[in-house]
Image: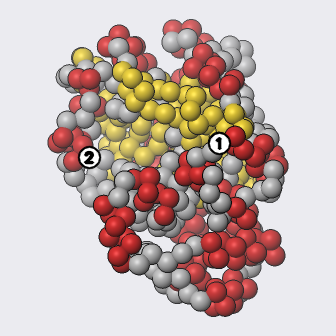
Amino acid sequence: MSPDRFAALYPRDLDRLRVAWHHLRIQGPPADYELTREEAEHPDPGRRYARRTIQEIACAGDRLALIDKVSPHSLYDLMVSEISDPSRATPAAVDPLTGRVLWRTGHAFVRFVSDPDVMRRFDLADGELHLALNCDPNTRDRESVQAAKQFHLHLLYWPGDALKPLEKAARFGAVRETRLRRQAVDPLTFLGAHLIYESLAGFDLHLPGARRLQPEDRLAIRGERPFGCLIELPGWKVLDDFAFEDLVRRLHLHLETLAAQLLEVFTGQRRPPLPWHRHPLRASAEIARGLAALPLSVGTRAGLRALSGALRDLSASTTRRLERADPMRRMDLMTLNQPCYALSLHGPERNRPGATLEDAGVVHLAIQPKLFSGIGGAGLLGLGGVPSVRILRGEGRSSAESWHRRGRFQRAFAEFNRSHQGDVSDIRFQPVKRFVDPSTGWV
């Protein structure tokens, strides 16, 4: 295994981290449900998602849709996405009401899978749930954390039986694939958590019971906390509060400003580069002076110095070669454009009758910055007590019967969500569609 020039950014005991990067394999759809060329390439998301749209929701000047994903992260998952054209890619780009409907839909998902009747009907017991949002609006060349630039939220649930393969998780130190190691544990995984935490000093969360948690690398490595900068929330009910939508919006704007400041320190530029370009790095002495002016701890400043020493300029000829190279080569050598992060919500409890997810007193909001890794928050997360699990999608094909069962789950949730949000004015829920068959989709 070749040396990793970013090794100085990782904790010394990282080799003990439990990982499951080859274990959790999720089947793809039946063959007739695969994307057509038009669905894959059409610029209008309404056209791209037409066969997979379960329900549309009109709110303010935006349009949301509940969508059946063609490449699922679990048998029981959905996506709620903004589908206006042109796309609105960030939490700050949509109307506040749209954001609130999206987060209330996330809370409705928690309530739905916690219902004892739903749990029995779909065999959901002992499962885990994640809500995951990716934001990468400026990377429009290489593979991106946010491949579809619509503002969207993944609603993800794995029953207990689906998590059993994680019992055979390995250790980070046993993984010999250098590129996989960097993709699954991005160089900003630990440094970025400290950086964001410190940058939020004095940032008012405006959410009663919420608090920042100081990063503890050893707890993350042991699986006792998720990766990233953590904000502890007093349960799932806060997702219904307008203050939560406002918090996520303000966090994005804060991260946008922080990214611009760091880009200026490293390159002298505040705006993202053009596609298939990256700004050249400033001289190391100039970077050091820029970092000294930032209100950061000695340790975080030293980490950013180490990062600046590990980065390399990309010449125009190199980026032209990368444009023609395979995706893994690009992802290994070409950074993402900031701000780029995965935001996820997860409660540590399993979902059991009498002690459901909805009962959780603590929920973690995790912000994970990305520099090289194109694996978003829905495809790389902590599950089953394993801190780093990579979801392998499209592993074989689901049967039509299994996909119909998935459709019944999704349709029942759409009806439940409409009832959950019935007290919100100025939104219009369109009728819930029915899944006919893999060839026809939802009509």
**Disc 1 designates what residue?**
175
**Which marked residue is nearer to the observer: mark 2 or mark 1?**
1
The residue identified by callout 2 is 45
Up the image or down, 281 lies above or below 138; here it is below
Asked where in the image residue 29 lies, by quadrant, the reply is top left
Name the quadrant of the C terminus.
top left
Across and down, in percent, residue 395 comes to 42, 27
Q: Nearer the viewer, residue 127 or 191?
A: 191
The reply to whether residue 286 is in sight is yes
Q: Earlier in the sequence, mark 2 or mark 1?
A: 2
Q: Residues within 10 Å of mark 2 (few under 14, many from 20)?
A: many
Which residue ends up furthest to the front in the rendered image?
1
Q: Nearer the viewer, residue 421 or 437?
A: 437
User: Which amino acid type corresponds to the residue marked 2 in the rendered image?
Assistant: Pro
Element type at marker 1? loop
Q: Taking 45 as reference, is 271 above or below it?
A: below
Residue type at mark 1: give it: Val
Inspect this view and state whether residue 382 appears: no
As drawn, which residue projects farthest toward the left?
38
Q: Position of residue 316 (x, y in %)?
A: 36, 78
Q: Residue at x 51, y 8 (%)?
A: 121
x and y percentages locating residue 84 in the rendered image: 28, 51
**Which residue is nearer to you in this view: 376 or 361?**
376
Observer-nearest of 401 and 151: 401
Q: Which mark is residue 151?
A: none
Residue depicted at 31% across the width and 56% down the height: 87
Task: Give the residue drawn at x 52%, y 40%.
Answer: 379
Q: Is residue 237 left or right of residue 156?
A: right
